[in-house]
Amino acid sequence: MGSVQLADGELNYQIDGPQDAPVLVLSNSLGTDLHMWDTQIPAFAEYFRVVRYDTRGHGRSLVTQGPYSIEQLGRDVLALLDALHIERAHFCGLSMGGLIGQWLGINAGERLNRLIVCNTAAKIGNPDVWNPRIEMVLRDRQEAMIGLRDASIARWFTPGYSAEHPDQAKRITDMLAATSPEGYAANCAAVRDADFREQLGTIKVPTLVISGSEDAVTPPSGGLFIQEHVNSAEYAEFYAAHLSNVEVGEPFSRRVIDFLQAR
């Protein structure tokens, strides 16, 4: 574990894998932290210098006054790369992390080698979804986070997975209950306000889009929209709900590795 000093606080990160390997940055979903990628690390660290971090408002990273924006979160990634003296990297983000990846592809493509966006969309939900959630979290605070944790099992995992792997499902959803209410609400606003539907065509880096066939939060239609609007983007779909990297495990990891190593 380490941290880099941003203008307004510290961003927590962890590095795994060989120092001289290509860099792969992993970006967490809303309500989780860098440990949502634990399943992937043994495979990814064989081939890459894996840099994963807690998005602002999550885990051990800074919690600043909201609302946040995806641009702000994307600039945090660029600051992390600068602090670690990384000129270019692969980037893989899931859900909110996928929105950050889209922003980077649109606005900082020169810093990316390849881009993977998972279980995401160019626009996720609308204010009618996000505003009541923000109000509830800021009003009820930890009680609201516990309620969101309990409801997230059905959104994040298929019933079969959560029944067969209750400890793993609990490990991930407990991250939500541990998230700062202020940080969570501020990131909800960032997701609410993001809309890249008109800008996807400006992404020029090789891109892979991954969806979960059972994902009710960001259905495959959103992933297919990205794939259709980013030139030469590849698409993969797995039987999974919202956190496909956790639920699918090794096949997810292998698809990402194959994409990143393709010539």
Image (cartoon, rainbow, N blue to C red):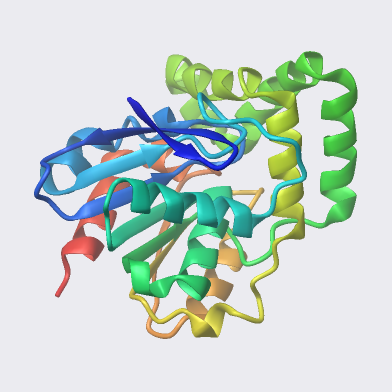
Q: Quadrant of residue 43?
A: top left
Query: Which image quarter is the N terminus in?
Result: top left
Q: Is residue 167 left or right of residue 225?
A: left
Q: Is residue 86 left or right of residue 196?
A: left
Is 219 above or below relative to 1?
Answer: below
Residue drawn 70% across and 33% down? 184
Is residue 95 at least partly visible in the picture?
A: no
Is 209 above or below relative to 53?
Answer: below
Query: Which image quarter is the C terminus in?
Result: bottom left
Q: Is residue 222 left or right of residue 169?
A: right
Q: Position of residue 109 (x, y in %)?
A: 41, 73
Q: Position of residue 206 (x, y in %)?
A: 33, 75
Residue closest to the far front = 7
Residue drawn 53% across and 85% down? 201
Of 121 and 79, the residue lying toward us: 79
Q: Position of residue 231 (x, y in %)?
A: 43, 85
Residue drawn 61% across and 18% down? 178
Of 231 and 89, the residue lying toward us: 89
Residue drawn 76% across and 15% down? 142
